[in-house]
């Protein structure tokens, strides 16, 4: 009898132990490229998640490399190899739709948007970038601006120049700077940052309507208007630093901060880096302006998270998506990141002077989508953009680059999505 009672107690303890072990095993793997210097905003959001769901073990799986240059390749291997993370960073627009929705690898999140009331909380234009085939396919955490020119007001004053408003003015200003001993007035880094510069040049030369027409297939890359982009781009490149290919985007920003270069054209994650990591004060230590010839136009991109089909920790992942789409989540993440909330109801008192000005422009400006950050063209086009750049750099011919771009646009059937 005594033996029986003991065995019941032992069995009950074992069951409790197992249940605890199972609970402790609840996990959430979040996949992104927000590593190192880019990490603070994501880490703050994960800390909030951990406080809300203390039993879930969060795995912050990052693959370093700005704009996802390395992460996207690792992600593709995992998604197609049947080992998807529980949630993954993906840009709103063609990067999401042309790759993951087309391949049927992500869940339709329309029910989540409905249950969370999000269709009224995100602007219609943003929701349409996340939508295709009757579904909404990811949750946006922010809006970043691509076409920003950064500078240090104190250095420009010292050099006796002001932020140029057009590309013509920009080239003249660079001449002045060079005569004052600034060897490389414009800082760039590894190849994707040069592509990033290209999209700002293209937006400035073409204007928002023709820029958009390129991606809907209505304007050919070989049209003289689009060929002219390469002419200006070549002139601008002449003022960049020779060591670019070895520099990350943060190191390109560092050249600005150290006064080695006068300008850097980069997305506003650079504001996050300068204010959150380097502790510089926006509007005092660093300044900004729309990249030349793009005043009144906001080239946008949005980081979002998708829910792969067939994941192990679906409930934990849905709770992650709920947090990052919430007002509280967005206002934890974005003030550190340099971006503004995707939501329309965020608390702007939590944001610094740069983000407040970006939020104003986001409401008042014409909106265009970024190429390099996934909004307007599928990843397959972007994968080949490096080839187009090398054609330009080896031939020094705008026409050759334009023909290469058109050939790739035809191959990926741009404009058909
Ligand atoms: C972009 C991304 C930003 C930032 C940037 C630099 O593609 O949308 O959030 O991470 O790359 O890595």
Image: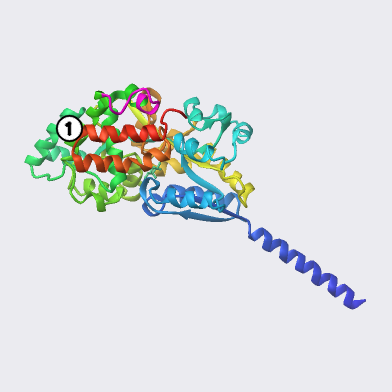
Residue 90 visible (yes or no): yes
From the viewer's perspective, tell me whether residue 135 is left or right of residue 396: right
The residue drawn where x is 18% and y is 38% is: 396
- Segment tinted magenta in the rendering: 213-223
Give x and y (percent) for residue 370.
37, 34
Residue at mark 1: C-beta within 8 A of ligand 1: no
Give x and y (percent) for residue 157.
15, 37
Ligand 1, by image quadrant, is top left
- Residue 407, located in which quarter of the rendered image? top left
The front one of 362 and 238 is 238
Magenta segment includes 219: yes
**Within-10-Å neighbours for mark 1: few <14, some 14–19, many 20+:** many
The front one of 243 and 360 is 243
Q: Residue furthest right?
A: 1
**Residue of label 1:** 170
Q: Is 212 situated above or below 34?
A: above
Q: Is 154 situated above or below 52?
A: above
Magenta stretch prevailing secondary structure: loop
Give x and y (percent) for residue 282.
30, 40
Numbered-mark total: 1
Q: Which image quadrant: the N terminus? A: bottom right
Q: Secondary structure at mark 1?
A: helix
Magenta segment includes 20: no
The residue drawn where x is 40% and y is 43% is: 337
Residue 284 visible (yes or no): no
Q: Residue furthest left?
A: 179
- Residue 25, located in which quarter of the rendered image? bottom right
Give x and y (percent) for residue 165.
21, 28
The front one of 118 and 220 is 220
């Amino acid at each position: 009898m005594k033996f029986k009672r003991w065995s019941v107690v032992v069995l009950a303890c074992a069951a409790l132990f197992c249940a605890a072990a199972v609970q402790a095993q609840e996990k959430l793997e979040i996949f992104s490229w927000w590593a190192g210097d880019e990490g603070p905003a994501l880490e703050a959001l994960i800390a909030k998640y951990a406080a809300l769901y203390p039993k879930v073990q969060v795995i912050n799986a990052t693959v370093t490399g700005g704009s996802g240059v390395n992460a996207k390749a690792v992600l593709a291997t995992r998604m197609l190899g049947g080992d998807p993370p529980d949630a993954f960073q993906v840009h709103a627009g063609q990067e999401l739709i042309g790759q993951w929705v087309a391949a049927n690898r992500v869940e339709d999140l329309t029910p989540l948007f409905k249950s969370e009331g999000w269709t009224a909380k995100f602007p219609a234009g943003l929701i349409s970038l996340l939508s295709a085939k009757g579904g909404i396919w990811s949750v946006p955490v922010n809006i970043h601006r691509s076409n920003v020119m950064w500078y240090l007001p104190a250095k420009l004053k010292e050099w006796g120049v002001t932020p140029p408003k057009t590309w013509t003015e920009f080239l003249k200003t660079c001449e002045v700077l060079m005569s004052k001993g600034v060897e490389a007035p414009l800082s760039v880094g590894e190849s994707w940052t040069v592509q990033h510069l290209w999209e700002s040049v293209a937006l400035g030369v073409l204007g928002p309507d023709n820029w958009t027409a390129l991606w809907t297939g209505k304007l050919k890359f070989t049209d003289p208007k689009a060929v002219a982009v390469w002419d200006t781009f070549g002139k601008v490149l002449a003022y960049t630093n020779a060591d670019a290919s070895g520099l990350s985007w943060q190191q390109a920003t560092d050249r600005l901060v150290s006064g080695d270069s006068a300008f850097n054209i980069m997305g506003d994650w650079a504001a996050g880096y300068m204010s959150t990591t380097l502790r510089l004060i926006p509007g005092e230590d660093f300044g900004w302006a729309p990249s030349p010839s793009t005043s009144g136009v906001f080239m946008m991109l949005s980081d979002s998270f998708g829910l792969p089909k067939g994941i192990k920790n679906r409930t934990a992942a849905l709770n992650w998506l709920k947090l990052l789409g919430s007002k509280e989540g967005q206002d934890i993440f974005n003030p550190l990141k340099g971006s503004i909330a995707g939501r329309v109801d965020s608390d702007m008192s939590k944001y610094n002077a740069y983000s407040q000005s970006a939020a104003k422009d986001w409401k008042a400006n014409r909106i265009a989508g970024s190429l390099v950050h996934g909004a307007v063209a599928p990843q397959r086009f972007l994968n080949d953009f490096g080839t187009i750049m090398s054609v330009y750099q080896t031939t020094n011919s705008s026409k050759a680059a334009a023909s290469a771009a058109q050939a790739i646009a035809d191959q990926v059937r741009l404009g058909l999505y």
